[in-house]
Amino acid sequence: MPASPTDYDEVPPEPGALIESLRSVGYSLPTAVADILDNSITANADNIYIDFYWAGVQSHVVILDDGIGMTEEKLKNAMRPGSRNPLEVRSSNDMGRFGLGLKTASLSHCRNLCVASKPTRGQVSVRTWDLEVLADSHEWRLLRAPSSAATEGIKRLDGLPQGTAVVWSVLDRLIGNEQPGDAVAHKRFNDAIDDVRNHLALTFHRFLDEKSVRIQLNGHPIVPWNPFMKDGRVPSSASPEEFIEFERSGMTFQGFVLPHKDALSDEEFARNGGPRGWTAQQGFYVYRNKRLLVCGDWLGLGRPAPWTREEHCRLARIRLDISNDSDAAWHLDVKKSTARPPALVRNRLTDLADAIRMKARSVFVHRGKYGRRPVVQTETERPWISKVRENRRVYSVNRGHPAVLALLQAYPEGKADIEAVLRLLEETVPVEQIWLDTAEQSRDHAPPYGGVDLAIIRSDMRRILEFLINGGINRQTAIERLRTIEPFDRYRKLINEL
């Protein structure tokens, strides 16, 4: 039986108050721009043009695409806060969920949002939210006139067969009351553009890699940044894709162990570290419809305690593809920037990720020597070995290393003294200081013999080579063995000159 009007009160929200509250959802400028691009990609746009115009307090942003566009009625509904119920069944390529993204993302950074849209063979329709109008009128007045800043964007839209232009003006969160001649404010504006560029290069890298969409920022193409180094000069090691059943669509897991720093040039190392650096970029990369949601995070997984970002796991990156019918199970937020794995798959994801972390640790600790040769592996002879003594990790000098053997056998009468010095070194390995220096200054860690004169390296090689030959090994076999002795295995060109 229908409720009687006397049974309830209608309490529509006060427009100005609600919008001001929605502005505090927490969008950063890069995530806000990315949310607008989601709509463009859902609309099957081939090209997206983003332009930041600097003019002090008159600065504005235009995001223009050549997607399918909207009729006037669809545009009006798209401008409605909460235009979609997140529980509705959507098409598999729909990038939205709450029906809030266009409004909350935009108004998080501007006080005037104007959207113009043109369907195929249709006319341009315009709607504008002006926060000053909402505050003064206390009504949800969606304006039909464009903002003054939208003129150029609408003119560009007129030249397209279809598309949509989103224009942000009165950028109070980004600009404030700065004047055009304020050099500090202008630099801050340009720095913000760089942040947007870096974010889009990662968030939409799969679309850009596939060339299914082209994105320009201030006239320059966005160059994709792929975190997995699949096609680099020294590619990463990838695990097989594994499908995990969950609800209707499931998810796909694939782990990547990136090359050790020693295998990369300085330029390759800097480029592939990502915007936040190697240690901060480790972990899961969660995608929905190829769009990145979560970038480098262990998602609260791990046992017995949740994993943290650790230096020895910095080479581990994991791609996880989920579908948009599991948004609620993943607790996806409005900004599409956080997600939590459903309880039913946490154990499986932990097992798979743990295996990738162990492989990454092996490559990191052993300087990438395992798994890089295409033929039969030969164990590298290292000066230091790791072992457990009374349930504690200790590091010992490898008595079987050719250099150590040479020393001990060359001075048999001083063996006890040499052993005493070796034990002193072993018992005072500055593990804590090494980890601290590595974490804080990872790029400053010198490789073995780094900066040492080549003549000294050649001399040390010859001494070990002579010891091996004197031990009864023919010269060619001794040279081949030298290729497996750390750190000489890093200097193959010098070994070839022996």
Image: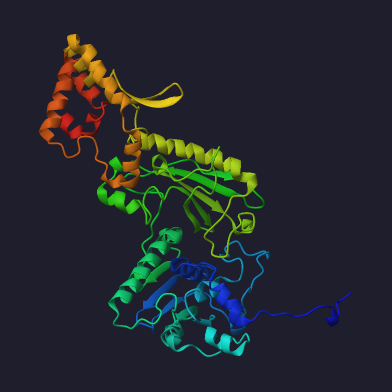
- Would you place residue 403 above or below residue 451 in this image? above
Q: Quadrant of residue 383?
A: top left
Left or right? Give the position of 180 relative to 119. left
- The spot of residue 18 in percent (x, y) is 61, 77
Q: Could one spot residue 123 in this view of the protein?
A: no
Q: Nearer the viewer, residue 380 or 442?
A: 442
Which colouring convention does the figure follow? rainbow
Q: Locate the C terminus and report the quarter of the image it occupies.
A: top left
Instruction: Please tell me which residue is depicted at 24% across the width and 27% down the height of the picture.
Output: 483
- The spot of residue 429 in percent (x, y) is 31, 29
Left or right? Give the position of 91 relative to 54. right
Tally of marks? 0
- Would you place residue 271 above or below residue 257 in this image? below
- The spot of residue 96 in percent (x, y) is 58, 66
Q: Nearer the viewer, residue 265 or 216?
A: 265
Q: Could one spot residue 316 in this view of the protein?
A: yes
Q: Locate the N terminus and report the quarter of the image it occupies.
A: bottom right
Q: Nearer the viewer, residue 487 or 390?
A: 390
- The spot of residue 209 in percent (x, y) is 41, 58
